[in-house]
Image: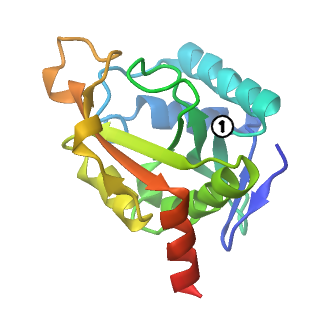
Amino acid sequence: MKPMRTERLILRNWEDRDRELFHRINSDEQVMEFFPFRRDRAETDAKMDEFRGWIAEDGFGFAAAEIAATGECIGFVGLLETDHVPSMPSDTIEIGWRLAPEFWGKGYVTEAADAWLAYGFETLDRDEIVSFAVADNHRSTAVMKRLGMSPDPARDFDHPDIPDSHPALKRHVFYRLAREDWQARKRAAR
């Protein structure tokens, strides 16, 4: 992938220097509050390599987000095909994110996600981009709303990868953004 630049961030493929941060955000109790697992170092290294491979192959994925002024990796934001959710068509693209807690509340996710939405609608020529989260994950759904995404309760689902031992994490709310709604928002912002 060619790195993308926003006002404060560089969105790029993963580098070996990001491994410590990637492990931290995948094992931190606060970051992973709405996930039924925490990854150890070997698992996070393998997952980062998987993310890096997807980006290299497809040109997009859950990419590293770096503060341009400092070069510090803060987490990831990106687009991904949702082939892991059987209830969705295989060509569905989701937008997702995960940042270290010290970078929450600074607008980084919204800034990076805006760039990825433009990429998804303009470069990938998608008609819709979706996002979903555990129903009680109000921080993530607030970001979805800031991005102009709308809830679609008819498409809410029980995530197939969440074990029955974590019933509070199974139900996921579904949000969507249609290309025409994104374009209208873009025109209104001018």
Above-or-below relation of 178 to 24: below
Quadrant in which residue 156 is drawn: top left
Residue 1 as seen in the image, left or right of residue 108? right
Mark 1, Cα crowd under 10 Å, few <14 / some 14-19 / many 20+, is many
Measured from the top left, where is residue 123 in percent x and y? 75, 52
Above-or-below relation of 174 to 158: below
Quadrant in which residue 31 is drawn: top left
Q: Amino acid at mark 1?
A: Gly
Measured from the top left, where is residue 108 in percent x and y? 53, 63
Residue 33 as seen in the image, left or right of residue 81? left
Above-or-below relation of 127 to 173: below
Residue 72 shows in this picture: no
| Nearer to me, 61 or 46 | 61
Above-or-below relation of 186 to 133: below
**Residue for badge 1:** 61
| Nearer to me, 159 or 177 | 177
- Point 53% across, 63% down: residue: 180
* Quadrant of the frame with the C terminus: bottom right
Of all residues, the one furthest to the bottom in this rendering is: 190
- Point 45% across, 55% down: residue: 177
Of all residues, the one furthest to the right in this rendering is: 2
Q: How is the image coloured?
A: rainbow
- Element type at marker 1? loop
Measured from the top left, where is residue 114 in percent x and y? 57, 63
